[in-house]
Amino acid sequence: MGPSVKGKLLDLILVLGGLLMIAPLVWLIVNALSEPIDAFQLPPQWIPRPPTLQNFQQVPDLIPFAQMAWNSLQIAVLTTAGALLTSALAAYAFNRLRFPGRDQIFSVLLAALVVPVQLTVVPIFIMMRWLHLVDTTVAIWLPALVNVFGIFFLRQYISSIPRELDEAAIMDGAGHFWILFRVILPLARPGLTALGIFVFEASWNNFFWPYIFLSSPEKMTLPVGLVSLQGAMGGGPAVVLFAAITLVVLPILVLFLIFQRSFIASIASTGLRA
Amino acid sequence: MVFVALPLVAAFGLSLFHWDLLSTPEFAGLDNFKQLVSDGATIRAVINTFVFALASVVTHIGLGMLLALGVHRTMTRGTKYFVRTAYFFPFLVSWAAVALIWKYVLDPAFGLANYYLSTTTNWLASPTWALPTLIVVDWWHTIGYTFIILLAGLQTVPAQLHEAARVDGANAWWRFWSVTLPVMSPTIFFATVITFIGAFQIFDPMVIMTQGGPDGATRSIVQYTYEKGFQSFEVGYAAALSLVLFVVIMIVTGLQFRLSRRWVHQ
């Protein structure tokens, strides 16, 4: 085999593998768009005919979908904004300020990076119960406001910004907040974007934490809502569940196609997975 | 601090008590830890988690590397775009949606999987197949991540090094072994550590797809912690279990860092 034949063959294998990867997602969308009677046929249908939106209309009858979407969005936005703000402040303090015990506190923080959330969930649950915050969205975003990884990541980022810029600002009589918000953060924008995408995606898709803390349908986030819908349906039509899943999955996939570049850059630079 | 350091100390404290969240906590000393060692379900969950994590690391790094090598060549723009996007897509889907979709894909009666594999196996209900099946689903979900990280690492390998090796008469395999692998070793190490930690914390697919069954065959440490803490309300025992998870992650990660000195190129 010549190198070009080998290359074409490899291309073919990769493309076939790629089709296999997206097959479950295509199947999801096709069934969501099918009449119940046409769905889940064997051999599998890859084109819905005739396509219908009736399954999507039925979703709100079974779960408060709009409310759940709102909860998810509210939590993701608060978490992202909070994590960015606290991380920026803390990162600035750890990198630019001198205070006693700074490096010791930072190493304790580093150690916290390896503490899995599963270890903290039992004590935080007890804490939240005490504060009567179980089954509220507060229980989800409040503990997520401080993001240890975010502090670490932004500190690395800020340390690469030359200190001469701060000094010039100090000469002009600027305070710390002015330096942070007017000098440092504009320069740290790519880092903030990467961290923001990462935190938002992780919050939007999170299942573990909301599953433990939320129990009323109108308080749930979308991932937990989907699972509750599956439970509530019993033997009901799976096409409605598929429609609901499609409503959750499709916007993310479209957003990804639009912002692919920053998305990939976010993964490659933060290196963390949700 | 309130949400990191305090809970850590609290978990240690709680693990020394018997408590059902309602009555007053009762001091238990090391009872919970003694129970850990003799509880068959705990041992099973620890084994399952280790099997899952090991399989996860091997399949993610091995196949992820092959994929990255396959894509890192001359290709038409369209093919490259399609392949990269197709393998990455599932990573964007939340575990909840992934688990629900796959429950149907794997359905013995009308699922895609059995139709194309022409079998009637009930994958998720089989004590032999349930855990391997979840490993496959997890691979489908997160390979895009490993792939992107490894591809980014591959792109840092300087072309001149390959050229030099080629001039010296090294064949493709030897060039991979003596140039690509050493230069990429920090990336591979990083991906291995992250995959391991992620796999040890696995919870979502077990809860949604199998409830840990059949007969505990897919129960993971975190899932067992959840059952003990939030279903049967043995809070002290759950805290002890979560400490086990913490210690296991610390030991394995520490070990990986130690071993990395032998193979990771600094």
Image (cartoon, helix red, strand yellow):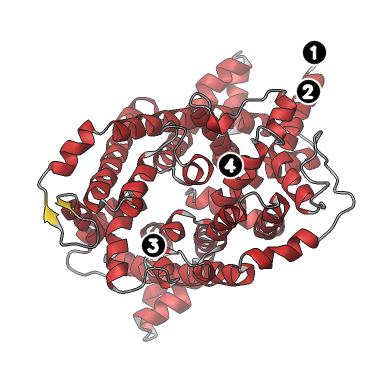
Label 4 secondary element: helix
Label 2 secondary element: helix
Residue A249 location (% of width, % of height)? 66, 55
Q: Nearer the viewer, residue A219 or B153?
A: A219
Instruction: Of the two numbered discs 2 and 3 on the same chain, state the one appearing first in sequence.
Output: 2
Look at 59% across and 16% down and name the residue there: B173
Q: Quadrant of the C terminus of chain B?
A: top left
Decide: marks 4, 1 in contact (CB < 8 A)? no
Residue type, numbered disc 4: His
The label on residue A251 is none
The residue carrying pointer 3 sits among few (fewer than 14), some (14 to 19) or many (20 or more) residues within 10 Å by Cα, namely many
| Residue beneath disc 2 | A9
Decide: marks 4, 2 in contact (CB < 8 A)? no
Residue type, numbered disc 2: Leu
Question: Is residue B167 something one can see in this rendering?
Answer: no
Frontmost of labels 2 and 1 is 2
> Callout 3: residue from which chain?
A
Answer yes or no: are tags 3 and 1 on the same subunit: yes
> Compared with residue B139, is residue B225 higher up or lower down, i.e. above or below?
below
Residue A16 location (% of width, % of height)? 76, 31
| Residue beneath disc 3 | A147
> How far is the residue under mark 4 from the one under mark 1?
35 Å
Frontmost of labels 4 and 3 is 4
The residue carrying pointer 1 sits among few (fewer than 14), some (14 to 19) or many (20 or more) residues within 10 Å by Cα, namely few
Q: Quadrant of residue B153?
A: top right
Left or right of B193 on screen, residue B249: left
Instruction: Of the two numbered discs 3 and 1 on the same chain, state the one appearing first in sequence.
Output: 1
| Residue beneath disc 1 | A1
Frontmost of labels 2 and 3 is 3
Frontmost of labels 3 and 1 is 3
Q: Nearer the viewer, residue A166 or B187?
A: B187
The label on residue B141 is 4
